[in-house]
Image (cartoon, rainbow, N blue to C red):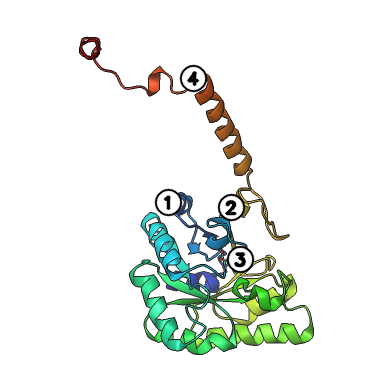
Amino acid sequence: MKNTVVTFLQAKEKGDKLTMLTAYDYSTAKLMDEAGVNSILVGDSLGNVILGYEDTISVTMEDMIHHGAAVSRGAKDALVIIDMPFMSYQASVYDAVVNAGRLMKEGRGGAVKLEGGKEVCPQIKAIVNAGIPVCAHIGLTPQSIHAFGGHKVQGKSEEAARKLIEDAEAVQEAGAFAVVVEAVPKKLARLITQRLQIPVIGIGAGNGCDGQVLVYQDLLGMFSDFTPKFVKQYAKVGEVMKDAFRQYIKEVKSGAFPAEEHEYKMDDDIIEKLY
Ligand code: KIV
């Protein structure tokens, strides 16, 4: 069944948990789609896990469009949400609408995601008014990592918790169809989830949310630079890949690969004439 912003809202009403994973390329998106994930997020985490930057600040619109379009080609039923990269929406409402439009037209996403609470509500309203669904992202918002002073849990004090609740209500009021809540205590995320009519997708926010999202390299054990506490590793694909790479190197060096079954044939009399 095709997942849309409407099915997202219906899932919240029915109490069905939503699943979201990040992807950045066609073949991974296709596997996730076939596995039945509700939504694929083309996260600007591609800056970290694909491009090797230490944060998401340098990710460009061109990066997001390039990877967004690849994922969109691979996802048949999953709702593809494409991240708006740093400085593609913060400076003005005009930038926000134009760049969200590019992610839809050129990246072929079904929705866009942007980071922030009250301060980005004018942008959310304008993008939604242009007919583009918006997923908000509050809590630990990686594009503001330098302002936070690192990867820190958000909303622990009363003041910070109240601000997060207000931000969640504000983005809902501005027209967001869902909100990602990152790195906040479980009890606060559950309270936000209860207060909102739109689905709350948690990452490092406990199991009281309407759904969960993870970066797939974390889930598969393919990224070792930095592993947050909230990650569960479902497989050790990184080890499987390294073993396969080592085996390949060994067999090429020994001549065991390629073997006869990997070769193309031709008539001996033709080859003899060439000597
Ligand atoms: O960029 C990303 O992958 C994200 C998720 C961590 C929610 O925003």
Callout 1–callout 4 Cβ contact below 8 Å: no
Amino acid type, label 3: Asp
Q: Is residue 151 left or right of residue 89?
A: right
Helix, strand or loop status at disc 3: loop
Q: For label 1, count other residues whose C-alpha is less than 10 Å away and answer few (under 14), some (14-19) or many (20+).
A: many
Could you give the CA–CA distance between mark 3 and mark 2, rounded to whole angstroms? 16 Å
Label 2, label 1: how many angstroms apart (C-alpha)? Answer: 16 Å
The residue sitting at 56% across, 25% down in the picture is 250
Q: Residue at x 62, y 51 (%)?
A: 223
Q: Which residue was labeled with disc 4?
A: 255
Sequence order check: which comes first, mark 4 or mark 3? 3
Residue 191 percent coordinates (x, y):
69, 78
Tell me the residue that label 1 is attached to: 30
Residue behind mark 3: 55
Residue type pointed to by label 2 = Gln
Write down the residue under mark 2: 217
- Which amino acid, mark 4? Gly
Determine crowd level at label 3: few under 14, some 14-19, many 20+ residues with C-alpha closer than 10 A. Answer: some
Check mark 1 vs ligand 1: CB closer than 8 Å? yes or no.
no
